[in-house]
Image (cartoon, grey):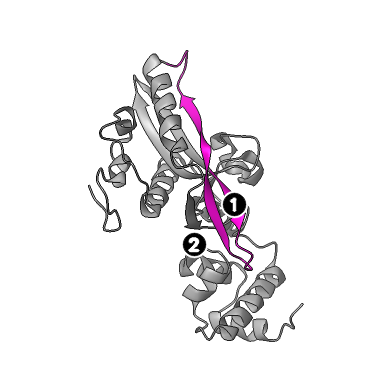
Amino acid sequence: MQHPGCPYKPFCSALLTDPLLLLDPERRPRHICQETLRASTEAWTLEAMPPVPTGSDFRVWQELESWLTAWPLPIGRQVMHPLVWSLAVTPGAEAAALALRCSVAGVAVDLFGLVRPQDTGLPGRWDWVVEPEVAWVIRGAGRPPPDAERLIRAARAWWARFAGQNLGRGRPVGTGTFADREAFLRALARAVRDLERAGRPVTQENVADCLVASSARTVRQWLKAFGLSWAEALELARKISPS
């Protein structure tokens, strides 16, 4: 398996289908691409996500979608919706750029490559830097098998090689939701001003970029949640004075 942006062998994308490559020093990748990292967290959340209770209102779905599509992925209880607290790996506000679920000796081992935010000095712009640590959870009863412990040691040693590497831009932990319609419109107003000052078109895609959202689809979900059309939201946002 190779994705178009993976320039070196061994291809880091191979981890998505065979995470046990981490046990083999000759076959495990010596680089990591953001495309692979994003694909890993997306695949992990889709597999691990518990059922959402029937009848949940749209705000619950909106908050869960914000978590499901976030990268890096919030894995600390403080920055996760209560419906997914069972998946929390730490009690704090940690985030993972990499998430892999491995099957070892009959148990599931979840591995998370930790990162920290780095302020770029620009509004709404954060880069993410690799921390030399891996969080892990063994989902199974009884004492962890030796093979699982060996995998965790190998993953820690491998991820530590990338310590300090700047992985580029992502969504900061805890962002991606708005308390009410007014908060959304204020954020939209700032995004519109930033785009117009930069000479960029005010599209949903560019607004998503300014709001550190995952995509234009997320912007459309916010519009739907607050009962606004795109034209109405822009009209109201342009009436808001700079704070």
Q: Earlier in the sequence, mark 2 or mark 1?
A: 1
Relative to 113, is 2 above or below? below
Q: Is residue 212 left or right of residue 8?
A: right
The label on residue 2 is none
Residue behind mark 2: 214
Relative to 47, is 104 above or below? above
Which residue corresponds to the image point at 60% horizontal and 42% vertical from the top-left? 94
Q: How many residues crowd mark 2 within 10 Å: few (<14), some (14–19), many (20+)?
A: many
Of residues 119 and 145, the one drawn nearer to the viewer in this rendering: 119
Which residue corresponds to the image point at 60% horizontal and 83% vertical from the top-left? 234
Residue behind mark 1: 117
Badge 1 amino acid: Pro
**Residues shaded magenta:** 115-144
Which residue corresponds to the image point at 52% horizontal and 55% vertical from the top-left? 65
Point out residue 60 in the picture as x, y percentages from the top left corner.
59, 53
Point out residue 73 in the picture as x, y percentages from the top left corner.
52, 47
The image quadrant that residue 53 belongs to is top right
Q: Secondary structure at mark 2?
A: loop
Residue farthest to the left?
1
Residue 117 among those drawn in magenta: yes
Closer mark to the observer between disc 2 and disc 1 = 1
The CA distance from mark 2 to mark 1 is 17 Å
Point out residue 115 in the picture as x, y percentages from the top left corner.
54, 45
